[in-house]
Amino acid sequence: MRFGFLSGSVEDIAKAARIGFDGIELNTAAFGNAADGDLDAGLIASAREQSTRSGVTITALAHYGLTQQSLEPGPVLATYRRVLDAAERLGVRVVASMSGFHADRTWDENVQAFGDRFGPVADEAERRGITLAMENWMGYGGRLPFRPVNMGGSPDTWDAWFGVVPSRALGIEFDPSHLAWQGIDHMRALREYADRVYHVHAKDVETLPERRYRQGANGLAFRFRIPGYGEINWPEFIAGLVEIGYDGGVAIEHEDDVFGWHDPGPRYDDGLVRGWQVLEPLIHPRGRS
């Protein structure tokens, strides 16, 4: 396994190396907006050169724009062709993604829309030897009224995805935090969908009982944390990855307000260091020399 964090900046390759990470997941925003045109070839070349020089592997190229951009099949395929082009130039074999969601359509209509969008994208990815890893975020918005912007939060949804897009190029970017706050057994899900786990997000979650009492099921009765500062059993989870034979990327997705999620700086980096300290010995155990 390669261990890193999700970033939207090429400059963070050097930061990853300084902290001790051997991987990084780069958002396509680091290279421009793939929905508008080709990504920046110069920045892509720089990222590949820095990755090679530092020994920090780019484990996935992430494009999450479908929560904000057009959901029609034509523009989506054009966008993902540009993302796949960039992945090939970077030597990256995994493209992480979001599904998108039409809040004004039924669930079945959204499942069909997913197939219409990602069937052609998965075929294109499969032709190039690249896999698509859909993040299992359900796009839940908290207190009413809210309009979900993404689907993917449960095994039923994954089965629906794979039903309408049969290509084996389609899989999951597995984030245990999105399951744990719902009460879904993330270890069982990891085992049952082992052959579809193509990338992993390391994010912890802390449940907030008082908020659940005050706001009920429609409140955001949880907050995301740096690994080790919430309720996920990380030795169990990493052992689970080892048991299923997973050897891809594990990327911290830093969304911890305690450590400066919305204000990147020294406190944000402190969160990354703390997450590294928790997970590095589990992912890369070392005996005494």
Image: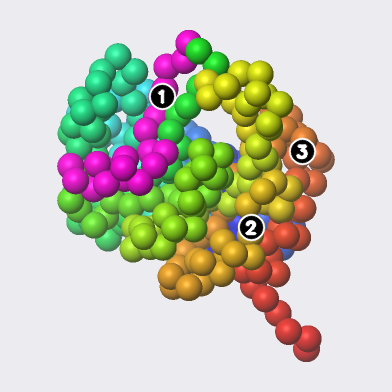
The residue under label 2 is 233
Instruction: Indicate the position of residue 225 as horizontal and vertical percent values.
Output: 68, 42
The residue under label 3 is 259
Give amino acid for label 3.
Phe
Q: Which label is found at residue 49?
A: none
Q: Compute the Cα span from label 2 to label 3.
A: 20 Å
- Model colouring: rainbow
The residue under label 1 is 149
Q: Residue at x 35, y 29 (%)?
A: 100
On whether residue 156 falls in the magenta region, the answer is yes
Instruction: Indicate the position of residue 31 as horizontal and vertical percent values.
Output: 49, 39
- Magenta stretch: give its range: 145-164
Q: Dot 2, how many residues are within 10 Å of its Cα: few (below 14), some (14-19), or many (20+)?
A: few
Nearer to the camera, 172 or 36: 172
Q: Is residue 17 visible?
A: no
Query: Foreground mark, 2 or 3?
Result: 2
Instruction: Indicate the position of residue 147 as horizontal and vertical percent values.
Output: 42, 17
Above or below: residue 254 compared with residue 287:
above
